[in-house]
Amino acid sequence: MNKLKDMLKFPSVWPVARYRFVFEITSEMALPDYAGSAIRGAFGHSLRRIACMTHRPTCPDCPLYRSCPYAMIFESPAPDSHQLQKFSRIPNPYVIEAPTFGRRALQAGDELQFHVVLFGRALHQLALVVYALQKAFERNVAQGTARLKEVFLVEEATETLVYAASSGKIESHRQSVEIIPVDQPRDVELTFRTHLRLQNNGKAYGPKDINATAFFSALIRRASLLREFHADPFPFDFHALKASSENISSTKQLVWHNWKRYSVRQQQGMYLGGVSGSWFFEKVPPELLGFLLIGQLLHVGKNATFGLGGYYTKLI
């Protein structure tokens, strides 16, 4: 029994922080239906312009690939070898949390606010992330421009100013969260604030066929890989944790939500459907509750980097 508990331990401290960026619009901006993809793309282009030293057309063949801050943040290199499996891609250590769905036009003088979550080593590059987003919006995002005013650290009940354009300085602040352990199974309700896209063999799960094991498997995998490749590794036992999720009963009130985005890289429109709504889980084991809590910051599923798979957790 003690051996099983050791296998299912959950780290209480996680190196992650959520920031609220506040911009003032300087020329009219037309936000698309969901701006997360547009902000992420502009951020990536700006970050590469600032950080890239060799100006190679692609990153993997660059001699600085594994030491470049751009690659670490935006195109995280997969390991050459791994004891469990071969990785072609690993999660990037950031999430862009854009304004809610809905097209809108912002005029000069209006405010634009969104959140950025940074994880692990990406936290050490906060100044670079702030500068890259500042320059991106000065150049062009969603056909307009904006001026960065302030950046706040967002915690559960408080916000702390960590950057003001007037000073140009990043203030010292805490860059971790603590997950308080729960020692008894709890009922949990999840409410998705952006739609969840999970796939099986390339096909997205719909409201009827998505299940608790698929959800927890994706959540555990994302959290554990971020921890392994971008912070201090922790010996999660994926198979034991997955098995722990297989007996969870749930009630779903989920609907399919389709969304079309335009990919500049692929020069074409793409449909990225997923489920949204609420999901009730009965008697979630203590070893999985921590993943649900930290997942509120990390998001889960496909395209988490531009904000999909975001949810709120309510312990009942």
Image: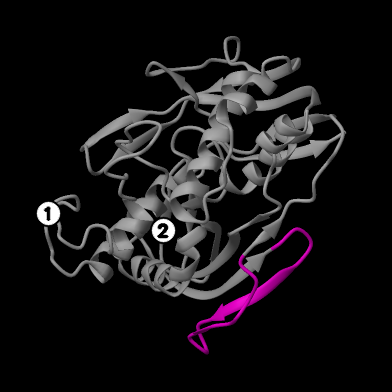
The foreground one among 273 and 188 is: 188
Which residue is found at the position 38% from the left and 49% from the top? 38
Numbered range of the magenta stretch: 155-175
The foreground one among 186 and 194 is: 186
Which residue is found at the position 79% from the left and 50% from the top? 180
The x, y position of residue 164, in whole percent, is 55, 82
Question: Against 148, is 1 above or below?
Answer: above
Question: Against 166, is 208 above or below?
Answer: above
* Number of the label disc, if any, that sits on residue 57: 1
Q: Secondary structure at mark 1?
A: loop
Q: Quadrant of residue 211?
A: top right
Q: Are marks 1 and 2 in contact (CB under 8 Å)?
A: no
Question: Against 170, is 11 above or below?
Answer: above
The x, y position of residue 2, in whole percent, is 77, 33
Left or right: 177 in relation to 157: left
Q: Is residue 170 magenta?
A: yes
Q: Which residue is mark 2?
A: 29
